[in-house]
């Protein structure tokens, strides 16, 4: 199509709330030990939003950092897409809240709801919008979750994994040899009840009964989700490589959703992903849903593991069920954290 532009990442930003919840703290409520959490999940710590912080607050910090990294003003953002499954409220969109906090007066703001796959789904929306638009030059795409408000501390299947955080990217025109290619997205609504927050929507509106039965907490069928991830992650990697005419040796970095570092490392090893090429950051932050993949990308960029021209394979999967992949040729985009503290944790690489 004439007038189409190549779209890539111009800057990355992230934000983690300063409060850190350790495995020892989580273990007490979940009826397990800190050692059990570390051995089963690989998660060492997770960040928790303060009482005055909502999803939009975390997201605004991350978008501001991404804009600074990209060298643009927030007023230059023409499209703001927020991916979250823990919005400030059912309506309006959390993206509109982020827009107001930032003062991004020129942005069209909207949400994308695809759970842990959300950032890549949102990036696809922004990519296609920018590619053919002569009016919008820059888009901000942010993934954010505040899962801590929706967890049952006694449920060891969820309380030990899920946490809070945000990560954002600024997308815009890049040279012809760089940017995103070969998005592939999918979903299977027949599995929608395997992980969800069942109450609070139009099917089960908030009531004394839904509060009493824990309907506003995250419910997850861990075994089914584990089998789903074990099946879909290798398939995403294999299909993306085949579509791109590549082998794993041609890929410099694999960015994936971070549901469980132990599981992610095992599957990566089984796939033959070379050591150090898969960014695993769930050790530091737990599962931060739609923010997981962009946070891993931001950490790889900030750690100077990515250089201009590097090939990045992105693979995501989440509730819905949803999944997606993309190939990205890195444009040398910098990354800035907007994080008061960083936990001490192993460097996020596949071992």
Image (cartoon, grey):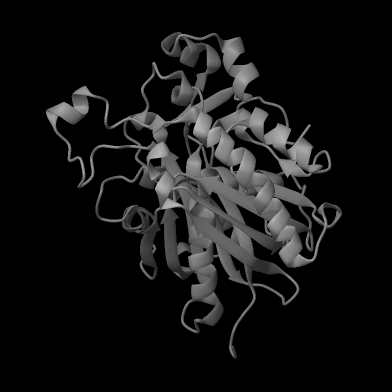
Q: Quadrant of residue 148?
A: top left
Asked if residue 315 lies left or right of residue 166, the reply is right
Q: Quadrant of residue 263?
A: top right
In the picture, the quarter occupied by the C terminus is top right
Residue 64 visible in this rendered orientation of the protein:
no
**Percent x, y of residue 286:** 55, 31
In the orientation shown, which residue stands out farthest toward the front? 190
**Percent x, y of residue 215:** 26, 31
**Percent x, y of residue 219:** 38, 31
Q: Is 126 rendered above or below residue 264?
A: below
Q: Quadrant of residue 39?
A: top right
Asked if residue 79 lies left or right of residue 171, the reply is left
Number of numbered discs on residues: 0
Q: Is 297 rendered above or below residue 48?
A: below
Residue occupying the point 47% across, 31% down: 163
Residue occupying the point 49% across, 12% down: 27
């Amino acid at each position: 199509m004439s007038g189409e532009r190549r779209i890539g990442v111009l800057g990355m930003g992230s934000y983690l709330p300063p409060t850190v919840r350790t495995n020892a703290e989580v273990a007490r409520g979940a009826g397990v030990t800190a050692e059990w959490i570390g051995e089963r999940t690989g998660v060492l710590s997770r960040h928790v939003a303060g009482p005055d912080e909502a999803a939009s607050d975390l997201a605004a910090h991350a978008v501001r950092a991404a804009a600074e990294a990209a060298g643009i003003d927030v007023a230059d953002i023409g499209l703001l897409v927020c991916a979250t499954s823990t919005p400030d409220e059912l309506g309006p969109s959390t993206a509109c809240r982020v827009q107001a906090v930032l003062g991004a007066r020129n942005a069209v703001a909207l949400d994308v709801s695809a759970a842990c796959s959300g950032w890549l789904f949102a990036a696809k929306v922004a990519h296609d919008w920018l590619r053919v638009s002569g009016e919008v030059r820059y888009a901000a795409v942010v993934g954010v979750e505040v899962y801590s408000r929706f967890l049952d501390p006694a449920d060891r299947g969820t309380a030990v994994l899920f946490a809070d955080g945000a990560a954002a990217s600024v997308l815009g025109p890049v040279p012809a040899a760089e940017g995103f290619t070969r998005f592939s997205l999918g979903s299977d609504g027949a599995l929608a009840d395997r992980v969800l927050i069942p109450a609070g929507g139009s099917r089960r509106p908030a009531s004394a009964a839904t509060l009493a039965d824990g309907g506003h907490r995250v419910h997850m069928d861990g075994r089914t989700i584990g089998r789903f991830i074990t099946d879909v992650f290798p398939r995403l990697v294999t299909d993306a490589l085949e579509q791109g005419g590549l082998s794993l040796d041609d890929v410099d970095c694999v960015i994936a959703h971070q549901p469980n570092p132990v599981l992610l490392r095992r599957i990566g090893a089984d796939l033959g992903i070379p050591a150090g090429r898969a960014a695993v950051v769930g050790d530091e932050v737990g599962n931060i849903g739609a923010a997981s993949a962009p946070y891993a990308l931001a950490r790889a960029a900030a750690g100077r593991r990515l250089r201009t021209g590097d090939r990045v394979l992105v693979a995501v999967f989440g509730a819905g069920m949803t999944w997606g992949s993309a190939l990205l040729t890195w444009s040398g985009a910098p990354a800035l954290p907007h994080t008061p503290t960083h936990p001490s944790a192993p460097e996020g690489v596949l071992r």
